[in-house]
Image: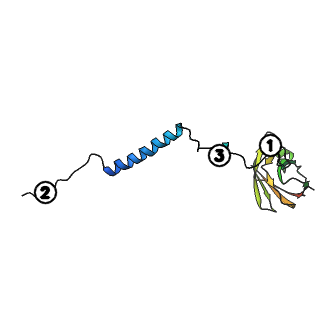
Amino acid sequence: MSNSKTLYRFRINPVELTLFSVISLIFCHSIYNLFHDFSSFQPTALAKMHSNPIFERRSLASISNFSETIHIRCDQTHEITKISKIRIVSPLCGLSEEQKETQAIKVSIKNTTSNFEVTGFIDDLKSEFYTEFIPLMTGINSIRIEITYKNNQIFKQELVISHELEK
């Protein structure tokens, strides 16, 4: 008598076959839904609006008084504005006439009232810099500007901007 058991081996694992079948069915169902229109499907862009923009008081962002560009001089220390965000444009200051060819390598701008730092962008062709928008707090805002040149010379300027609310 032989006690050997016959071991059955499958060419394909039944668990893998089951998983493959389920995933294939889900894929086929997705493709079917992609090409057939159902009335229950409504994209958000086509849904009914909850607001009525014709009667609400709205304005375009491009024409609002939300931001302003302020051109400052090298010796300027004070500016008054009613706008809540400003962009500063200024010539590169702090060099004598014989050092005018020295390039600026970094501009640091910080609203020390709110501890908000912004990026300064240097335009070598116009010999000026400009900033991204700086949010202002109501009242006095102290802006610190530091320009670093290639010869390690640093020019510092303090600018006080008074932000008054519109009445």
- Please state which of residues 147 and 46 is positioned toward the viewer in this rendering: 46
Q: The disc labelled 3 sits on which kind of residue?
A: Thr
Tell me what residue is drawn at x 53 percent, y 39 percent: 34
Mark nearer the N terminus (2 vs 1): 2
Q: Are marks 2 and 1 in contact (CB under 8 Å)?
A: no
Q: Which residue is mark 2?
A: 4
Whether residue 103 is visible to the viewer of this picture, yes or no, is no
Counting from the top left corner in percent of width and height, residue 95 is at 84, 49
Task: Between residue 152 and residue 134, name the one nearer to us.
Answer: 134
Quarter of the rendering occupied by the C terminus: bottom right
Which residue sits furthest left? 1
**For this view, does 62 lie left or right of residue 82?**
left
The kind of secondary structure element at disc 3 is helix
Residue bearing the label numbered 3: 44
C-alpha span from label 3 to label 2: 66 Å
Instruction: Give the side of residue 29 with respect to residue 85, left or right.
Output: left
> CA gap, disc 3 to disc 1?
57 Å
For label 2, count other residues whose C-alpha is less than 10 Å away and answer few (under 14), some (14-19) or many (20+): few
SS of the residue at dot 1? loop
Residue shown at 79% from the left, 39% from the top: 125
Which of the image's four quarters has the N terminus? Answer: bottom left
In the image as oriented, which residue stretches furthest toward the top? 35
Tag 3 and tag 1, C-beta contact below 8 Å:
no
Q: The residue under label 2 is which amino acid type?
A: Ser
